[in-house]
Amino acid sequence: FQAAEVERSVQQQQLQELQEAAEVEKVSRQQLQEALEAAEVERVAQQQQLEVLGDVKQEAKRRLAKQKETHIKALETVQAENVAQQQQLVKLHQAFEAIEAEKTMQQQQLEVLQEAYNTAQSEKMAQQEQMQQLMQLHEAAEEEKTRQQQQL
């Protein structure tokens, strides 16, 4: 029963950790969305300025800036994915360690139960031997009683 309770507790803790990780992921996505929206606002403002000025040089700068922004976003996306994967790896490692700890604890409990079983078996055999000795004493006493009655 304790092992089941511990298992349930470990599973509940793991579920809570996964929920917390999902919440962190949700917040990160929301921040990324806000950054994307801010970048889009900035891009629109730059485009309107270029249209007003009509300057070819300004258009070339915008294209370069957009290309740079795309590269930065791609790099940030890759970095964010790397961070998320690293966090998942840590969570998996923690889960593995928890499972190993649970396995060790269950092995120890199994050993304790085996020892208790062996002790109970030894006690049972000792009690059976005592019972046989008592039965032999009882039979000897009955035989002695019968012999004495016959002598009377």
Image: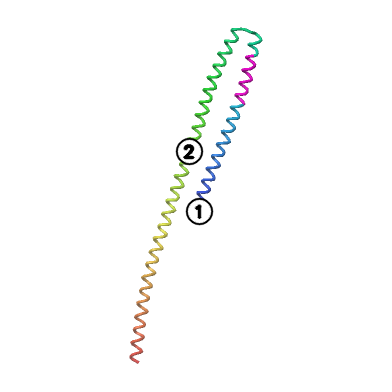
Q: Residue furthest bottom?
A: 152
Q: Is residue 111 above or below residue 143?
A: above
Residue numbers of the magenta segment: 34-47
Return the mark for residue 67: none
Residue lying at 63% horizontally and 8% vertically, measured from the top left: 54
- Whichever of labels 2 and 1 marks the residue nearer the N terminus, that label is 1
What whole-number distance in Å separates the C-alpha atoms at marks 2 and 1?
25 Å
Q: Is residue 121 above or below residue 84?
A: below
Q: Which amino acid type is marked by label 1?
A: Gln
Q: Is residue 151 above or below residue 123?
A: below
Residue lying at 47% horizontally and 43% vertically, measured from the top left: 98
Q: Which amino acid type is marked by label 2?
A: Leu
- x, y percentage for residue 77? 53, 25
Quadrant location, the C terminus: bottom left
Q: Residue furthest right?
A: 52
Overall secondary structure of the magenta section: helix
- Residue 39 on the magenta segment: yes
Tell me if mark 1 has few (under 14), some (14-19) or many (20+) residues whose alpha carbon lies within 10 angstroms of its own: few
- Residue 152 on the magenta segment: no
Mark count: 2
Return the mark for residue 2: 1
Q: Quadrant of residue 130?
A: bottom left
Query: Foreground: 70 or 150?
Result: 70
Does residue 28 appear left or right of residue 148 in this picture? right
Residue lying at 33% horizontally and 87% vertically, measured from the top left: 147
- x, y percentage for residue 52? 66, 10
Return the mark for residue 92: 2
- x, y percentage for residue 35? 60, 24
Residue lying at 65% horizontally and 8% vertically, measured from the top left: 53
